[in-house]
Image (cartoon, rainbow, N blue to C red):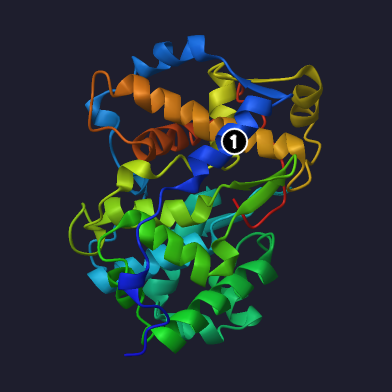
């Protein structure tokens, strides 16, 4: 089997997400973290909240084998971004009307059940637009359909050329190191390399890449493909749902002008300073929450706080604040 890299030549690196986003937090003009609210929220976090977000999925995946499961998370994280729109993209599956990530999972579950196509990366590499439209069929066309196809084609091509169309071979090249795996993903799959520039400094977010690594670790219960060290260095995944929840908890505070733009659903351009500040402060708010929780529950990592907040974002009420709107493949 041909390998694109020599795994022994890639040493585990420090996750640059925390350091680079700290620069943004220190210089933010429109978003601040209210540290006084962090202990209040941290007290509500219990051992029961330490669970993988996927455990709440309204589907039965017990019939899916280990390799299929791994390829499922790869396909899901390759396309899991920018679901918002008017009207919403909604998948009707087995009597359930689902949107967002649950809708994507439903579409992929439907694909598996209908045996419309394979989860093998060699299929991703040659997938065309009409086939993907069929897989993701819903009440309306999903936003950024062409971009989702491009990501799948890219990922499938890399794995087909260098790893015998097997993401398991790719994961094994990380030698059980979450940071090495993260670095491999953003290096070899350019569409996962989620980086911005803020006041002349490069800022790493790596939202989808970190989520993919965290999903592998948690979905396989830290065994097999999920037997990864350095998972504690992964950060929160800066999307549009987490900052909305943190803002409702008064942990994130927006300037008057930014609050008005978000509440009026005015689109923030990708890579604008406002968007970067929201994302960076989200990461550090979760980091500070994690540190506070660890005083009581030492084995809590940022991925656990991340998943708990994301699941909270799925609970909708009339009081729910809008999330910021940015059209991007990053999240």
Which residue, as the protein is rendered here, is positioned at the far left? 223
Estimate the x, y position of residue 128 in percent, counting from the top left. 61, 83
324 or 183, which lies in front? 183
Residue for point 77% across, 42% down: 272
Estimate the x, y position of residue 4 in percent, counting from the top left. 42, 82
* Quarter of the rendering containing residue 178: bottom left
Q: Regarding mark 1 in the picture, which secondary structure is present there?
A: helix
Q: Is residue 106 visible?
A: no
* Quarter of the rendering containing residue 81: bottom right
Q: Which residue is mark 1?
A: 280
The relative height of residue 56 versus residue 312 in the rendered view (above or below) is: below
Q: Is residue 28 left or right of residue 256?
A: left
Estimate the x, y position of residue 308 in percent, counting from the top left. 39, 33
Q: Is residue 174 left or right of residue 238?
A: left
327 or 114, which lies in front? 327
The relative height of residue 294 versus residue 86 in the rendered view (above or below) is: above
């Amino acid at each position: 089997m041909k390998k694109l890299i020599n795994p022994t030549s890639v040493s585990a690196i420090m996750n640059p997400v925390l350091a680079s986003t700290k620069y943004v937090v220190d210089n933010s003009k429109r978003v601040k973290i209210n540290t006084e609210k962090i202990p209040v929220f941290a007290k509500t976090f219990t051992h029961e909240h330490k669970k993988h977000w996927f455990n709440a999925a309204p589907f039965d995946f017990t019939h899916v084998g280990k390799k299929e499961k791994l390829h499922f998370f790869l396909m899901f994280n390759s396309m899991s971004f920018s679901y918002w729109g008017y009207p919403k993209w909604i998948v009707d599956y087995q009597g359930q009307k689902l949107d967002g990530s649950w809708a994507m999972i439903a579409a992929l579950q439907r694909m598996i059940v209908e045996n419309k196509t394979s989860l093998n990366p060699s299929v991703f590499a040659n997938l065309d637009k009409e086939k993907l439209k069929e897989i993701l069929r819903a009440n309306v066309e999903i936003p950024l359909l062409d971009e989702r196809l491009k990501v799948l084609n890219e990922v499938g091509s890399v794995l087909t050329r260098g790893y015998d169309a097997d993401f398991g071979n790719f994961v094994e090249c990380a030698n059980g190191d979450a940071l090495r795996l993260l670095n491999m993903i953003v290096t070899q799959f350019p569409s996962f390399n989620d980086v911005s520039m803020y006041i002349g400094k490069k800022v790493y977010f790596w939202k989808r890449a970190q989520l993919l690594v965290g999903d592998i670790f948690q979905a396989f219960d830290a065994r097999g493909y999920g037997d990864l060290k350095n998972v504690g260095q992964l950060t929160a995944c800066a999307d549009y749902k987490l900052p909305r929840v943190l803002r409702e908890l008064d942990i994130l505070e927006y300037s008057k002008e930014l609050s008005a733009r978000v509440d009026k659903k005015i689109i923030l351009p990708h890579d604008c300073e406002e968007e970067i500040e929201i994302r960076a402060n989200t990461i550090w708010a979760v980091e500070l929450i994690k540190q506070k929780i660890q005083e009581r529950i030492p084995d809590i990592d940022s991925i656990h706080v991340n998943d708990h907040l994301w699941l909270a974002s799925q609970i909708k009420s009339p009081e729910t604040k809008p999330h910021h709107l940015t059209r991007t493949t990053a999240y």
